[in-house]
Amino acid sequence: MVRYLIWRGIRLLPVLAIVGLFGGNLIGPAAVAEPADELEQSPAETEPPASEKSRHQILTELYDSLRQASDEDSAELIANAIEKLWLRSGSDTVDLLMSRAIQMVNEEDLDIALKIFDSVVSLAPDYSEGWNQRATVYFLKKDYESSLNDLRRVLRLDPRHFKAISGLGLIMQELGDKESALRAFRHVLKVHPHLGVARRSVEELTREVEGQGI
């Protein structure tokens, strides 16, 4: 499912060549400029409860290691570890729901997936990956305003969630707000300096926005 894989960060096609993924008829660039401006200052929404402090500490250390990674191979290993940790909610019930919902997305049953993700965010409102995955489904259903709202929630909970920041950049880019998209992708590189999709997007957008390469 090409569109889902692109959102998940696997660049199978150039972003600007993907037709019909986003449209400006629901919300315009001016209405969605705010999230990119919030990237530099979004604090974690809540202090993690005691039972989650170990997970929070590990994630913080992994993000620090990712930012300092010396090459793409080591960065990829760290990023994979981060993504696995994202999926761990601390609740067997929520983890089971997440697994089922992701399966439904892969099978393109988006209505069922959305209902399951609705249950996830209701049961675990402080679990950032539940909001991120639901944002993905809204994106695939072309409900871009709802997708952006969920991405804002992700970034309040986890300001260094590089997949959510990348998703924000993609939406801005396709809506024609290239300056906000460029800011978003540049911010991704502060978190994950070796993320190829973000680096290529920065190169493309820098030429378009500033008239020169980086």
Image: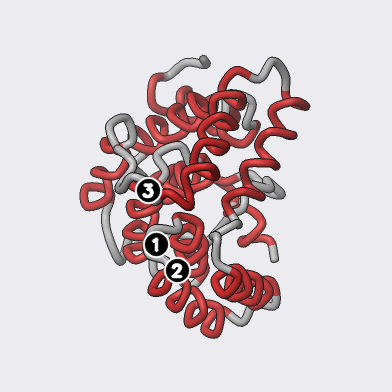
The residue to which callout 3 is attached is 157
Q: Earlier in the sequence, mark 3 or mark 1?
A: 1
- Between label 3 and label 1, give the one nearer the viewer: 3
Q: Which mark is residue 138?
A: 2
Q: Secondary structure at mark 3?
A: helix
Callout 2 crowding tier (Cα within 10 Å): few <14, some 14–19, many ≥20: many
Residues at marks 3 and 1, CA–CA distance in whole angstroms = 16 Å
- Between label 2 and label 3, give the one nearer the viewer: 3
Callout 3 crowding tier (Cα within 10 Å): few <14, some 14–19, many ≥20: many
The residue to which callout 1 is attached is 147
Above or below — where is 97 with respect to 23? below
Residue 111: x %, y % from top left:
52, 83
Q: Residue at x 68, y 33 (%)?
A: 78
Q: Amino acid at mark 1?
A: Ser
Q: Secondary structure at mark 1?
A: helix
Residue 73: x %, y % from top left:
78, 27
Is 155 left or right of 88, judged from the image as shown?
left
Q: Are discs 2 and 3 less than 8 Å apart at CB?
A: no
Is 115 left or right of 11, judged from the image as shown?
left
Residue 114: x %, y % from top left:
49, 77
Q: Earlier in the sequence, mark 2 or mark 3?
A: 2
Residue 123: x %, y % from top left:
42, 73
Q: Residue at x 45, y 58 (%)?
A: 127
Q: Nearer the viewer, residue 203 or 75?
A: 75
Q: Earlier in the sequence, mark 2 or mark 1?
A: 2
Callout 1 crowding tier (Cα within 10 Å): few <14, some 14–19, many ≥20: many
Q: Secondary structure at mark 2?
A: helix
Q: Amino acid at mark 2?
A: Tyr
Q: Amino acid at mark 3?
A: Leu
Above or below — where is 31 with respect to 74? below
Q: Residue at x 32, y 30 (%)?
A: 40
For the N terminus, give its image quadrant.
bottom right
